[in-house]
Image (tube, rainbow, N blue to C red):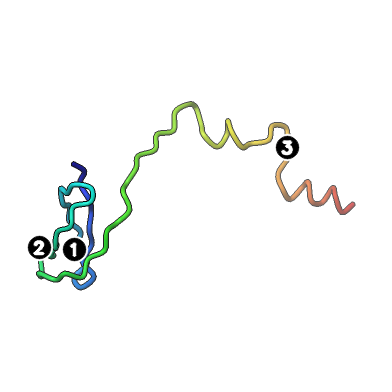
Amino acid sequence: MPFYRYECSCCQTVFKVLQQNGEDITLRCPACGSEELERLMPRIGVVYKGSGYYTTDYAVKGRESGASTSAKAKG
């Protein structure tokens, strides 16, 4: 059974509920008792491994700074 995160529309309290898929239950905010809740998107973790994500994947080797290359293109 997964945990689902909900946020109360009235007091902005965020809480978790252990709930089966397809289970229809009436939820209430534990802080204020309101039934106006919004289910939040799940959090995911991302781990970048290596010496540098940007420098190894997107950097163009041998390229000069943008100011000098635009000056060369005009002249």
Secondary structure beneath label 1? loop
Q: Is residue 37 left or right of residue 67?
A: left
Real-space Cα separation, disc 3 to disc 2, in angstroms = 57 Å
**Residue plotted at (63% across, 36% down):** 59
- Tag 1: amino acid: Thr
**Residue plotted at (22% across, 58% down):** 6
Real-space Cα separation, disc 2 to disc 1, in angstroms = 8 Å
Q: Is residue 13 left or right of residue 49?
A: left
**Residue plotted at (68% across, 35% down):** 60
Find out whether the residues at labels 2 and 1 contact each other: C-beta distance under 8 Å: yes
Q: Position of residue 66 (x, y in %)?
A: 72, 48
- Tag 3: amino acid: Arg
From the image, state whether disc 3 or disc 2 is nearer to you. 2
- Residue to which mark 2 is pinned: 30
Q: Position of residue 42 (x, y in %)?
A: 31, 49
Rendered position, 63 above or below 69 = above
From the image, state whether disc 3 or disc 1 is nearer to you. 1
From the image, state whether disc 2 or disc 1 is nearer to you. 2
Q: Is residue 51 left or right of residue 40?
A: right
- Residue to which mark 1 is pinned: 13
